[in-house]
Image (spheres, rainbow, N blue to C red):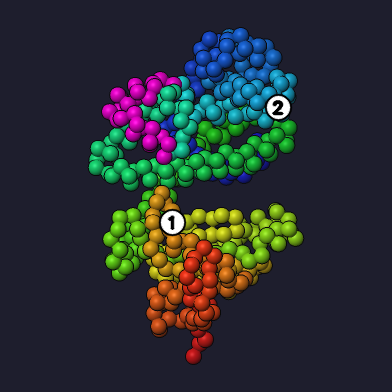
Amino acid sequence: MQGRSAPFHSALALCGAREGTIHAVAERLSLKQAAERVGVAPGTLRRWQQAGVIPELDGSARWTESAVSHARIVARLRERGHSLESIRAAGRRGRLAYGYIEAMLGSDQPVRTLREAAQVVDLEPALIERFWASMGLPANGLERLTDEDVQALHYVASVLAAGFPLVAFLQLARVYGQALSQIADAEVRLFHLYVHEPLMREGVPGLRMAEEMESLARDLLPLASPLMDYVHGRYLRHFVEQDVVGHMEEELEAGDAELGRVRVALAFVDLAGYTRFTEEEGEEEALSLVERFVEGVSTTLPDDARIVKTIGDAVMVVAGDAHGLVNWAVGFAGRFDERPHPRIGVHVGTTIYRDGDYFGRDVNLAARVVARARGGEVLVTDSVVDQVPASSQLRFEGTGQVKLKGFDEPRQLCRATRAPER
């Protein structure tokens, strides 16, 4: 690994697991115990061992956790119809070298059923099912709950006992599940692309590759938890401040007291002619352009604005201050000098807030506005013009009444530009 450590460590630093789930791998299992963990007959496991598809075995009759993890991979591949010969060949090339790392993340040995766990944590089984579904976890796991699952349910019980509303908690669980599943997916994919693939290209033998990957992971995985805690804390402070200073004022000004509704400024930003650009320049170049475009949006937004989501080349942004958002939009449209040029639609309205996202008629309207803009153009609705101070450095040029798709009544749109200096 000489000469490779620095880039590998940088890449692996992106990959994480909660510190408490990293365990020392010391337990040795009998063939029968290993077969129960894998979910196959002992004879099947013995046949796989004799066929040489479990490289972690050192010839002894006792099975390590990493060997069991590798056997589970083999079982999944066999279910998909792969032959033992193809699995053995893939193992020699290191394509299955995740057994050691999987074993580090803790045993998934089931210890309780749903009803048993519900009694232990004093929660109704139906409530646990709702939490489980909100997190996006597979339903069949509810009858095979591990010690870590039960500990998580204890946390759930504590949150609800403290008085946090159930409807809000389930929304938060959905946000956690969606965000963390995306993080975990990125960790595994980035690890494969920047650590695993280079080792395979260098022809490192499968067992040695697994050992090197495990050594790197054991050193660096514990660092992910404090890093995520740090980022989480920073964003919590930021959004608490913005809610107190900005969003609260917007909601009070709107006089909208209905629970779950917030008044915000919305912007949709995309690249005009992106589909044609993809056809002409190819998918790789188009993807690179989108990455630069999204990075440009995220690094230039006002303090009270954030990206809610990206869909292809489109970015949805929310903010508390319409003036600041339009000022940013005009500046960004003029600064982004690559082709295709960005186009931006801005609207102010009342939205329904659910699961970290914003929904409703006004969100749909903002999305329709950007579809009417040309490359390099910022279009805003009349509700935005009403929110921007007359003394601002922005100028609005009416484009007339415009019929937007999906809306019965035409809407007054204006083109936003920088006011000429006097």
Residue drawn at x 57%, y 11% as measured from the top left: 41
Circles 1 and 2: CB distance less than 8 Å? no
Write down the residue under mark 2. Answer: 90
Measuring 43% from the left and 53% from the top, which residue is drawn there? 357
The amino acid at mark 2 is Ala
- Residue 129 lies in the magenta-colored region: yes
Vertical placement of residue 102 versus 195, above or below: above
Q: Amino acid at mark 1?
A: Phe
Q: Is residue 54 above or below residue 229?
A: above
What residue is pinned by disc 1? Answer: 359
Q: Residue at horizontal 57%, vertical 66%? A: 371
User: Whole-percent x and y of residue 55?
Assistant: 65, 20
Image coordinates of residue 255 in percent, x first then y, are 28, 66
Residue drawn at the location 42% of the way across and 27% of the way down: 142
The reply to whether residue 186 is in sight is: yes
Q: Residue furthest right?
A: 280
Q: Nearer the viewer, residue 223 or 175?
A: 175
Residue 301 visible in rendering: no
Give the magenta range: 110-134
